[in-house]
Amino acid sequence: MDRSHPPLGISVVSGIWLLMGLLNGAQTVRVVTTGPVSSELLLPLGLVSGVSIAYLVVGIGLWRTRSWAWKGAIVLAVIGIVGSFLQQPVGLLIALLLLCVGGYLILERDQFLSAEGAI
């Protein structure tokens, strides 16, 4: 389903995903540019970079109400909820936000039905 303007709630969720991708990307750039990067940080930086790109791609897909973006957003919400518990106490707020976003997407999954009718 391709629309020029998604519903307001989906626009907000798309914006949240884009913002998370940009913030994670900015953190990665900050770590890399502050000095030499140790070999222990290469794997975490790679993972954060990959997740940042995924957030950006899924955010654009949500804006365009693509069915693959709905699936990706649910996966990223679950990953984000699990990962947020490592960032106490702010992580609880992030987990709550992601839980609300994931719940909203599940309730609004009909917006992402493809022309074939399958998600």
Image (cartoon, grey):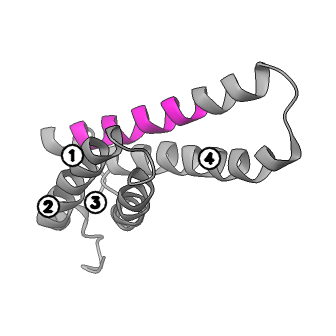
Q: How far apart are labels 4 and 1 at the CA level?
A: 24 Å
Q: Give the residue at x 43% y 45%.
A: 87
Amino acid bearing label 4 = Val
Which picture quadrant has residue 78?
bottom left
Q: Secondary structure at mark 2?
A: loop
Residue 14 belongs to the span the image colors magenta: yes
- In the picture as drawn, the residue positioned furthest to the front comes out as 88
Q: How far apart are labels 4 and 3 at the CA level?
A: 30 Å
Q: How far apart are labels 1 and 3 at the CA level?
A: 13 Å
- Mark positioned earlier in the residue sequence (2 or 4): 4
Q: Secondary structure at mark 3?
A: loop
Nearest to the observer: residue 108 or residue 82: 82
- Mark positioned earlier in the residue sequence (1 or 3): 3
Q: Quadrant of the N terminus?
A: bottom left
Q: Secondary structure at mark 4?
A: helix
- Relative horizontal placement of residue 43, taking residue 78 as reference (left or right): right
Look at the numbered discs 2 and 3 and tell me whether their residues touch, using CB distance below 8 Å: no
Mark number, residue 48: 4
| Picture coordinates of residue 107, whole percent (x, y) | 11, 64
Sort mark 3 into few (<14), some (14-19) or many (20+) by Cα contacts within 10 Å. Answer: few
Residue 48 to residue 108: above or below: above
Q: Give the residue at x 56% y 51%.
A: 51
- Mark positioned earlier in the residue sequence (4 or 1): 1
Please give the residue where the numbered disc 3 appears in the rendered image: 1
Residue 39 visible in the current orientation: yes
Disc 4 versus disc 3: nearer the observer: 4
- Mark positioned earlier in the residue sequence (2 or 3): 3
- Mark positioned earlier in the residue sequence (4 or 3): 3
| Picture coordinates of residue 20, whole percent (x, y) | 43, 37
Amino acid bearing label 3 = Met
Please give the residue where the numbered disc 2 appears in the rendered image: 108
Please give the residue where the numbered disc 1 appears in the rendered image: 10
